Image: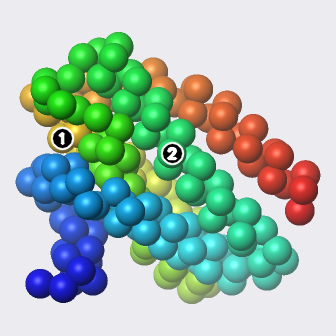
Amino acid sequence: MNLINLICIRIVKAATLSREGFEEIVSDKSATWQGLLVVIASAVATGIGALSRDISLVKEFPSRIVIAFIGWFVAATISYIIGAKLLGSNRQNAGFGEVARGLGYAQAPGLIRLFGAFPGIGPTLFVITLVWQLLATLVAIRQAFSYTSYLKPLAVFLIGFIPYLIIVLGFNLLLESSV
C-alpha cells in the first residue's frame, strides 16, 4: 500500500472514531508527520470554506495555518503532561509522539469544512465538525494512554482546555498584530 492510500485510510478511520484505527496511528512512530499533514489540510479546508463568506480572510490564510500547527503542538504537549504525568497512563511507554499523532489525525473531520464554501451551510458545518473533532480527540487521547474508559480522556481535555486556550489565543493575537 502506498503512503497516500495509507494516510487516506487512516483519515477515514479517525473520522469514523475507530479505536483500532487510532491505536494503529498512535503506535506508528512514522505517523507523526502524517498527523501534522492532517492538521494542515484541515486548516486549509477550513480556510477555503470560510473564504466563500468573506474573501478578505485571504490575507489571514497563512497565519491560520501557523495557528493550526501551534494549536496542535500545544494541545499535544498539554495533553501529554496531563495524561502521562498528572493522571497516569496505562501505556508503559506513552510519549509525546503517541499523543501528537493521535491529536493530528483527530483533526480529520475538519477536512469536511471545505464544503463550507457552499452558501448557507458553512457555520452549521463548522459547529458539527468541531464537535466531531472533540469526539475524535477523546478517542485519540484514550488510545494514546491506553485508558479503558472515556473518563480520563475527558479529564485530560477539560484540565488542559484553559491553558490551551490562553496559549493559542496569545499566539493568535501576536500573529494578528503582525498581519
Percent x, y of residue 42: 48, 68
Which residue occupies 26% across, 74% down?
7
Identify whether 165 is placed above or below 71.
Answer: above
Left or right? Give the position of 1 relative to 170. Answer: left
Q: In this view, does 137 lie to the left or right of 40?
A: left
Secondary structure type for disc 1: helix
Q: Mark 2 is on which residue type?
A: Phe
x 65%, y 59%: residue: 66
Which of the 4 quarters of the picture holds residue 171?
top right
The label on residue 73 is: 2
- Rendered view: 144 above or below 132: above
Kindly indicate the quadrant of the structure image that contains residue 29.
bottom left
Vertical placement of 81 versus 35: above or below?
above
Give residue 143's mark: 1
Quadrant where the C terminus is found in the figure: bottom right
**Nearer the camera: disc 2 or disc 1:** 2
Label 2, label 1: how far apart the Cα atoms are: 18 Å
Looking at the image, tell me whether mark 2 or mark 1 is earlier in sequence order. Answer: 2
Q: Are marks 2 and 1 in contact (CB under 8 Å)?
A: no
Identify whether 133 is placed above or below 7. Answer: above
Given residues 106 and 7, the one toward you in this image is 7
Whether residue 129 can be seen here? no
Amino acid tagged 1 = Gln
Q: What residue is drawn where x is 43% and y is 61%? A: 36
Residue 103 position in % (x across, y down)? 36, 49
- Which dot marks residue 89? none
Which image quarter is the N terminus in?
bottom left
